[in-house]
Image: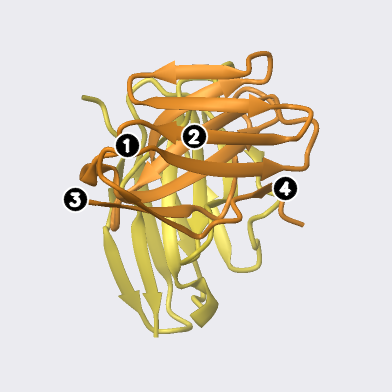
Amino acid sequence: DQQVKQNSPSLSVQEGRISILNCDYTNSMFDYFLWYKKYPAEGPTFLISISSIKDKNEDGRFTVFLNKSAKHLSLHIVPSQPGDSAVYFCAASADAGNMLTFGGGTRLMVKP
Amino acid sequence: EAEVAQSPRYKITEKSQAVAFWCDPISGHATLYWYRQILGQGPELLVQFQDESVVDDSQLPKDRFSAERLKGVDSTLKIQPAELGDSAMYLCASNVDGNSYEQYFGPGTRLTVT
């Protein structure tokens, strides 16, 4: 069973607007969540993360929100830029140093 | 900026042949991971090393896959014999130690089995 799900395979947004990428998880043992960005033919690049003891973490244009009761997190990108066009992966971990469990990814396209 | 190095970047092989991938983690990173990413899916862990020791290889198909990290630095992942279903991106990642969550990925090796 998929423990981390990204239900939207793709998202198209106009430049300057907000992009919202969603992620759901089922495993209550997950205590840390990460977002990675991936360009074609490259490895995933770490973007932003959040501990389960927080509900929000912000870094520049990127903000991650965590709703533990709903087992849901989201990544907000404001304002969206064409260079943000990539595949975004949500990942979760149950313990520091352990494996990451990834969602299937969401392809974001930011149109000029 | 320190990076995870992987080679080759691309590999085409015929089924039943042997293939090997190499990874050099960020200097000083004790934990090393091999993931496999099938097109359209997220990466899935194959094997995890802490220094030279295997920590988790529960998802590694041991009848055909092997991994080693003999001196606790660089690592090799081998497939023998390769099958058509092994076509995927093989990603290596490293983590400074067992007390942090962030993993840093290399560029990957794209394997095509024909």
- Mark 2 or 3: in front is 3
- Asked whether the residues under marks 4 and 1 belong to the same chain, the reply is no
Q: Name the amino acid type tagged 3.
A: Pro
- Mark 4 or 1: in front is 4
**Does residue B71 show up?**
no
Q: Report the Cα–Cα distance between label 1 and label 2.
A: 26 Å
Give coordinates of residue A101: x percent, y percent. 62, 43
In this rendered view, identify the residue nearer to me: B4 or A65. A65
Tell me whether circle 4 and circle 3 mark residues in contact (CB < 8 Å): no
Tell me whether circle 1 and circle 3 mark residues in contact (CB < 8 Å): no
Q: Which residue is mark 4?
A: A3
In this rendered view, identify the residue nearer to me: B64 or A47. A47
Give coordinates of residue B36: x percent, y percent. 51, 57
In this rendered view, identify the residue nearer to me: B114 or B70. B114
Would you place residue A95 above or below residue B53 in this image?
above
Q: Which residue is mark 2?
A: A75
Q: Name the amino acid type tagged 4.
A: Gln
- Which residue: 38% across, 37% down? A18
| Element class at badge 2 | strand
For chain A, the rendered hue is orange
Neighbours of disc 1 within 10 Å: few (<14), some (14-19), many (20+): many
In this rendered view, identify the residue nearer to me: B63 or A44. A44
Would you place residue B56 above or below residue B31 in this image?
below
Left or right: where A108 falls relative to A26: left
Q: Which residue is mark 1?
A: B4
Q: Name the amino acid type tagged 1.
A: Val
Left or right: where A16 falls relative to B29: left
- Asked whether the residues under marks 2 and 4 belong to the same chain, the reply is yes
